[in-house]
Image: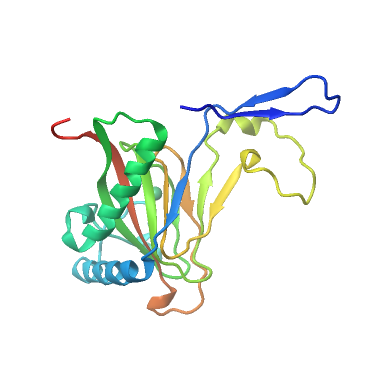
């Protein structure tokens, strides 16, 4: 595997500075080419599930604010088969990208939906027992809360440098990451990475104002026969 190395020219020009990037936090993303039809299908499946189990369960969601969380086995339901298959295809890309054992594959182990009406949010949490986790945005009206990733390098709070004011920092210097939800977008992040969802500030109180997602956990499993 290639190493992430940067060669940097120094002001004097005599000695070259080299940078190695160790312990990075990787976030993969994709936008599905068939998001429109996928979301129509998945939204109907989620709403049917919510009708069937209106109480749901409570995890990072606040039931008191109207946040609904389905059970965790949606990947076993054929109505979510198209999306599950697509997630697993993306996971094969991640496995290959990271040089994981080819006798094993990354596979969805749990999958659930969360629906957030306006003003509801999700507390900061991690996903114990999984390697990778992810989210797929089924419906994300303007103002729907961003997902906030928390800097895992907690020791960095002991001191912080001063950057050039009003200049966009390089991503490797960020200590906060917010990703705006967009319908059809899928994110994959390490399960140990703390994340929270900001309040849904979409206008209106109809079904279109809800922030609706599918989330999943992923583990590495042996491929039968390999
Ligand atoms: Fe989560």
Counting every numbered tag in the picture gives 0
The quarter of the image holding the N terminus is: top left
Q: Position of residue 123 (x, y in %)?
A: 44, 51
**How was this image coloured?**
rainbow
Eyeballing the image, is 41 above or below 214? below
Which one is nearer the viewer's eye here, 14 or 118?
A: 14
Q: Position of residue 182 (x, y in %)?
A: 47, 63
Eyeballing the image, is 47 above or below 153? below
The quarter of the image holding the C terminus is: top left
Residue at 47% from the left image edge and 71% from the top image edge? 141
Q: Position of residue 190 (x, y in %)?
A: 42, 39
Q: Position of residue 32 (x, y in %)?
A: 39, 60
Q: Quadrant of residue 77?
A: bottom left
Which one is nearer the viewer's eye here, 136 or 150?
A: 136
Residue at 68% from the left image edge and 24% from the top image edge? 18
Kindly give the residue lying farthest to the left in the view shown.
225
Apparent side of residue 16 relative to residue 4 in the rendered image (left or right): right
Residue at 77% from the left image edge and 38% from the top image edge? 162
Kindly give the residue lying farthest to the top in the view shown.
15
Apparent side of residue 187 relative to residue 216 in the rendered image (left or right): right
Which one is nearer the viewer's eye here, 2 or 181?
A: 2
Apparent side of residue 197 relative to residue 14 in the rendered image (left or right): left
């Amino acid at each position: 595997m290639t190493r992430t190395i940067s060669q940097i020219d120094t002001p004097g020009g005599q000695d070259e500075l080299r940078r190695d990037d160790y312990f990075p936090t990787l976030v993969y993303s994709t936008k599905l080419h068939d998001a429109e039809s996928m979301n129509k299908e998945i939204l109907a499946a989620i709403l049917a599930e919510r009708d069937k189990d209106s109480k749901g369960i409570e995890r990072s969601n606040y039931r008191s604010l109207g946040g609904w969380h389905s059970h965790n086995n949606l990947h076993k339901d054929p109505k979510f088969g198209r999306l599950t298959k697509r997630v697993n295809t993306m996971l094969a890309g991640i496995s290959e990208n990271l040089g994981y054992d080819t006798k094993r594959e990354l596979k969805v182990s749990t999958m659930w939906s969360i629906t957030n009406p306006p003003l509801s949010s999700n507390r900061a949490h991690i996903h114990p027992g999984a390697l990778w986790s992810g989210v797929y945005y089924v419906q994300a009206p303007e103002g729907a809360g961003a997902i906030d990733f928390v800097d895992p390098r907690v020791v960095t709070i002991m001191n912080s440098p001063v950057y050039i004011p009003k200049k966009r920092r390089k991503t490797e210097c960020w200590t906060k990451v917010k990703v705006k939800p967009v319908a059809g977008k899928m994110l994959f992040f390490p399960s140990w990475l703390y994340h929270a969802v900001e309040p849904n500030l979409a206008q209106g109180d109809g079904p279109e104002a809800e922030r609706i997602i599918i989330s999943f956990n992923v583990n590495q499993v042996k491929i039968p026969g390999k």
